[in-house]
Amino acid sequence: MDILQNFINGVYKDPVNSNYLDNIEPATGLVYGQTPDSGEEDVALAVEAAEKALPQWRIMPLEQRADILYAIAQGIESQLDELALAESIDNGKPVSLAQAVDIPRAASNFKFFAHACSQFASESHSMTNTATNYTLRQAIGIVGCISPWNLPLYLFTWKIAPALAAGNCVIAKPSEVTPKTAALLGKICLDAGLPNGVLNILHGTGSSVGAAICNHKKIKAISFTGGTTTGAAIASQLAPQFKKLSLELGGKNPALVFADCDFDATVEQVFRASFANQGQICLCASRIYIERSVYEKFKQALVDKAHALKPDDPSMASTQMGAIVSQDHLDKVLSYIALAKNEGGNIIAGGEQVQLTGRCENGYFLQPTIIENLDNSAQCNQEEIFGPVITLQPFDTDQEAVALANDSQYGLAATIWTTNLSRAHQLSEQLNTGIVWVNCWLLRDLRTPFGGMNHSGVGREGGFEAMRFFTESKNVCIKY
Ligand code: NDP
């Protein structure tokens, strides 16, 4: 049995209340470990440690701070296989995906912000002949980072790295559903020379330790990635406390496929955008709009690929589609498939749970599922399903495609598939999403602003946007 501990002040510790939660492997449905069910007392200990560490950490020369962050990245890289396997066991994702994407990206997050902290600068404003203003951007102090289960170490480090780079001490909570790689990160940070108390990692439920982090008076900012409902609850909890808050929330991402697209490449990429990580990426395409003249051909190509993609044991190198993260989440996704039928949708591929044999006979597997014939106002086209389920709709004109895409409470990421450059530019301006990818998906430059509009979030991560979030700006005005 793999029993995890909190990481506080550079030491692995049991939770104060000695309570644990079961950790389940989604591919087998079996309990394989336990996770601390931490509470307020653990947050208090972590804040105490962070307070002690803060004075030295915030004044550490940038070069030294950057060296430590770089060493953490190298530590992650040196344990790539072990971390990838842990991520796959915890989350159900194919180990090949964790090896190729999740863990390398976690290392890149630390490398990127190791460099960013030495390049981050602030403005000066001259009042000619009268005064000069300059802006200081100073660490906030102690900040909280809360992340979801879908890309566990990838998103955990996407918050922690800039928070540390900006000179803050961090109290971080991974999802209770996927705590393993976050737990391993503590030791990597110790080995890299991160001073005790600078990063504290607490495990447990959102309603207990997550809420305690949000409520602690000495934690001055919260960076949260997760569902829109949770984000709304946190926003209302934090508003009277006047804390800085960054929210990266859900999505219902449109893909706009035009008849002039590079057909084969687009089929390949739209399919990947739909079903990577079992469709459990906030950026996954879920509403596929296809120009009517190529609708039937494109649909058939997607259906053929869906039939060929078989969920299997995520620990096998050849597996391309793994397990859904939990029984609860599988039930939620299945309930949307049932709802789609009630709403008049046709299931043209998949739709069924998959029972494997052997080790994975009780795992949470689901066929890649394609639905058509649903109106844009259907719940399955408006609500985030967050699984391997997409809907298809035809359109006739550019403006109809944009109107369908924008008919959503969400606004995270859109993709446009066309060889008409002018159309690509024009529609990119018109789409109400924080990110538009043209003829690609999930092509990431870590310097770019990352985040969504409307119910997909408030604020942006990435590059200097993240450094700005994790600092307070202060104007200094000097009269001549
Ligand atoms: P949740 O909102 O359920 O949880 C996210 C994190 O918040 C978890 O660590 C959770 O803890 C914690 N949490 C839950 N309630 C509270 C609370 N009241 N106070 C503080 N923390 C709390 O999201 P999921 O984990 O289910 O993740 C899936 C969602 O994340 C999807 O909607 C997806 O779109 C979104 N997402 C958005 C991304 C973006 O960049 N915009 C990227 C990736 C995912 P615990 O799980 O331990 O209860």
Image (tube, rainbow, N blue to C red):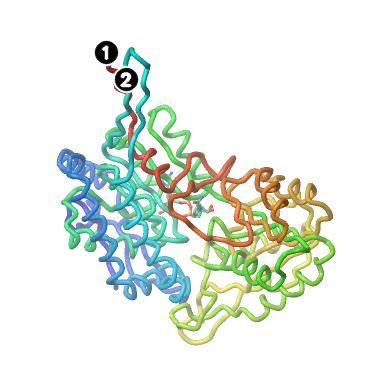
Query: What kind of element bears circle 2?
Result: strand
Discs 1, 2 touching: Cβ within 8 Å: yes
Quarter that holds the N terminus: bottom left
From what the image shows, is residue 269 above or below residue 237?
below
**Residue at the image point whose x is 76% and y is 51% from the top:** 401
- Residue 480, label in figure: 1
From what the image shows, is residue 430 above or below residue 15?
above
Instruction: Tell me where residue 90 appears, x and y as whole percent.
Output: 40, 68
Name the kind of residue labelled 2 in the image. Answer: Thr
Taking depth in this image into account, of 232 and 244 the one nearest to the observer is: 244
Taking depth in this image into account, of 420 and 14 the one nearest to the observer is: 420
Q: Which residue lies furthest to the bottom in this view?
A: 358
Quadrant of the rendered image containing residue 315: bottom left
Taking depth in this image into account, of 422 and 461 the one nearest to the observer is: 422
User: Reading the chain from its start, which is encountered first: label 1 or label 2?
Assistant: 2
From what the image shows, is residue 225 above or below residue 221?
below
Quadrant of the rendered image containing residue 223: top left
> Crowding near pointer 2: few (<14 within 10 Å), some, many (20+)?
some
Instruction: Tell me where residue 30 appears, x and y as whole percent.
Output: 42, 74
Quarter that holds the C terminus: top left
In screen coordinates, is 44 left or right of 81? Answer: left
- Which residue was labeled with disc 2? 132
> Crowding near pointer 1: few (<14 within 10 Å), some, many (20+)?
few
